[in-house]
Each structure stands twice: as structure tokens, then as C-alpha cells.
Amino acid sequence: MLGEIKGLNEECGVFAVWGHKEAAQITYYGLHSLQHRGQEGAGIVTSDEERLSIHKGLGLVTEAFKEGELDQLHGHASVGHVRYATAGGGGLDNCQPLMFRSQTDSLAIAHNGNLVNANGLKLELENQGSIFQSTSDTEVIAHLIKRSVYPNMEDKLSDALSMVQGAYALAIMTEEELLVAQDPNGLRPLSIGRLGDAYVVASETCAFDVIGAQYEREVQPGEIITFDRNGMHSKLYSTSAPRRMCSMEYVYFSRPDSNIDQINVHTARKNLGKKLAAESPVEADVVTGVPDSSISAAIGYAEETGIPYELGMIKNRYVGRTFIQPSQELREQGVKMKLSPVRGVVEGKRVVMVDDSIVRGTTSRRIVSMLKEAGATEVHVRIASPPITHPCFYGIDISTKSELIAASYSVEEMQDRMGADSLSFISIDGMLEGIGRSSQNSNCGQCLACFTGSYPTDIYEDTLHPHDKVVNG
């Protein structure tokens, strides 16, 4: 698929509203602002205090909701979701929010992340009589909630989450309340805002700006927040795990206008570019970034070195999704369709090409080739993250080492394979300093597992490729 040519895809985005008469419409706009987090499906569930109503569909938000369909979703509360399938595969059954009806009440659940012990829990639940409607790991949480013996939803959710491991930013809604929760490590972002008297919850703060909401605070690791007729109240269900926000949220996934833990993503990326320039300077005539996520780092690199920043590549924003099989040849053609060098900028120039990451290496090789075909005399590649050498099990679609070029080749070998004149990655320390989380407070750690192989949770054998080994810690 052409949408996969960058090589990294994050699983999804979550948005929720409590206490607004146009909850569905607000959620639609919120999901639209989170579209970069998932393009394979979208859905909204609303509550009018008596029943839950749902609509979901495949494709972009604008494709999933046709004219008039949003008007059928009534109520003051809603949960919405955009999906990129990494766990359980695609299809409408796996589109979220997932909704379940029972004799006593209904439940809708939206999840950003991935559970590392889902397979074992599914087997255990099936042996006890559970029947799963989807192949999504998210459904495990719903079954655990329903099986809990506790009397109220907050305690039921706390009980369920005590049995799961992995990354999860959750929004769960019944007819009478909305609950949101973070995993104990805080691996995925989730923020709370206010829109008049209403509350809104989003995977990224950029969604608040779109709907005119004011940022209030982050959902904390190990925290459940409940919204009901009595307002908003909080409960910590876990306090033992250190904070481990995904580093790639700052490097690549989140929109530049979002803030995570009050650190602006654009500013963090710009600082990454400056750190990268300090660690890996090179004589060149022009600096350019790979649109869009690398632009901020390229600007930082240019400012630090004094080399002019130029728009050396243009992104074609009208390349749609395709169902053509993503063979190697078509992947490379997809790069050419989506990115075009600006000959007038790069011809006869020594170019520094700044990118956010290298995963499989195919995209980088093609971009270097395109720049040289456009007349660049030299292409120096600078990467604003360390080499990705280990798979991710928390909601990013890199689950085996065989997919990762840096797991098999040295920096020099990668440079030769992509035809670059030089190649350098930022150091882990440089990345941490550039993002700046360590300077905020003691609870601002980052997950470095894809760079180091040290995972913040246990990783189970049934999630691993046979040739992969991991270090739990």
C-alpha cells in the first residue's frame, strides 16, 4: 500500500466527549484531526443515557461517515476511534470502538496500543466459555470487565487492567459514564480538555485546537478517570511502574502542533535536529527534510549548522490508498508517486537529507536515488532517531527483527546500500536531551525498547518471531 511507504505506522487514535449535546459532531472533527494515527477505519459510539448508538466504517473518517450518518448518533457523550491495523488484522469487525450489549447494560471501548499478553488471556477466557467477536486484542479487556465481580464500572475496569500487560490508552463508555485509563508505564499519550462545561479526551492535544477546547492535563500512568453526573473523579489503580512514553511519539507519530506532557512536538523535533547537527556535522550547501514529519528536525539542523534550509522535496498529498500488493518494486514506485525532488533546489548542490527514522531502508534508498537523479552532487543522510534494531510490541507495526535494516547491517553497510555519501544517526543521549523530557520531572522517562531491546513490560513467547530474543525489564 502506498500509505505504508514511510515504514512505520502507529495503531490508532482515541477521542471522547462527555457532557455536550453535539458529542458525535465534535468527535467527528476530533477524529479528523487524529487521522494521521490511522487510516484504515473509523467509528463513533454515542450515549443518550438510555442506549448506545454506533456507526463505523472502513477508510478515512470522511469515507467512514457518509452524508446523514452522523445525524443518527444522538447523545451527550461519545467515544471515537481511528485505526491502523497492527494487532488482529483489518476488517470492519476489528474497527473500533468495539461495542457489546448485555441484559444489564452496554459497553463501548476504544484502545490505542497493544497488549502483550492478549493471546494467553484469550485462550484462558475461551476455555472458560468466552466467545470473541473480533480478532482484536482490545476485546480481551471487555471480557475481563464483564467477568469482574466488583459492583461498579471503575472497580471492574481496575480489576480487568490488573490482568493485562502492554500499552493502552483507553476510552470506555456505558449508558451512564465515560472512563479513560492509561497503562502503568504511560506508553501512549492521552490528554483531557474542556469545551465549555463539557470534557473532551484525545490521544493528541492537536484535536483540542480543532474543536476549540482548552487543555487541562494528561491522563497519568496507572490512572482511571471517570466522567459521570457527578463530574470528573480519578483513581490510581497502579503506581509501581516507571514512566515510559514511546519515544517515537515525539520523533514521528504525533502532529507537530501537539503537546505531550507539555512539550511541543515541533520544538522537540527541532531540538533533535540541532543535537544531530552538533553530533554529525558535514560540509554541504543545503539542508532538506523528508515531508512531513522530518521538516522540524531539518530546520533545527539547518539553524545549528548555518546551512540554508530549502524545500528539496515535495509531497503529493493526493496519492490515495491502493489495494495493489506492496511488492518491493511497487513500494519504490510508491515513493516516487508520493515524493518528488525539487530539481531547482538540489541540482549541483551537496544536500543534507534529514529523516526521522530508518526502518526497512527501502524508502531512504529511493529518496537518495531521486535526489541524485535530480542533480544533487552529494547526499548526506542524517537521522533524528537512533538505529531501530528491535521490534515493537506496543502498537507499532514492526514486530520482527527481520524487518529492520539496522538489526542486520552496520551504519557503514546501510550507507553503502542506500548509496548515500554519508549516514549518521542521533545518539540515544542526544535524543533524550533533544526531546527534553528528563528536564521536566522524575516521572518523564521514555521507552527506548526499539533502540536498545530492553522492554518495560514482560514479553511473552507467543508474541515473538522464533528468531527474536528480548530482554524484559
Image (spheres, rainbow, N blue to C red):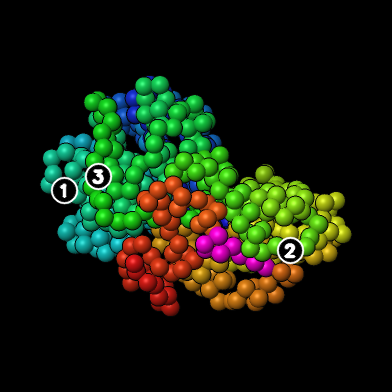
User: Which amino acid, by three-letter code, is at mark 3?
Assistant: Leu
Residue 57's mark? none
In reply to whether residue 426 is colored magenta, the answer given is yes
Marks 1/2: CA–CA distance: 60 Å
User: Which amino acid, by three-letter code, is at mark 2?
Assistant: Val
* x then y, percent, for residue 310: 76, 49
Mark 3 highlights which residue? 236
In reply to whether residue 432 is colored magenta, the answer given is no
Marks 3/1: CA–CA distance: 18 Å
* x then y, percent, for residue 194: 40, 27
Of badges 3 and 1, nearer the viewer stands 3
Left or right of 3 in this view: 234: left
**Residue occupying image coordinates x 54% and y 45%:** 265
Quarter of the image that includes the N terminus: bottom right
Q: Which residues are magenta?
A: 423-430
Mark 1 highlights which residue? 148
Look at the numbered disc 1 and give the secondary structure of its residue: loop
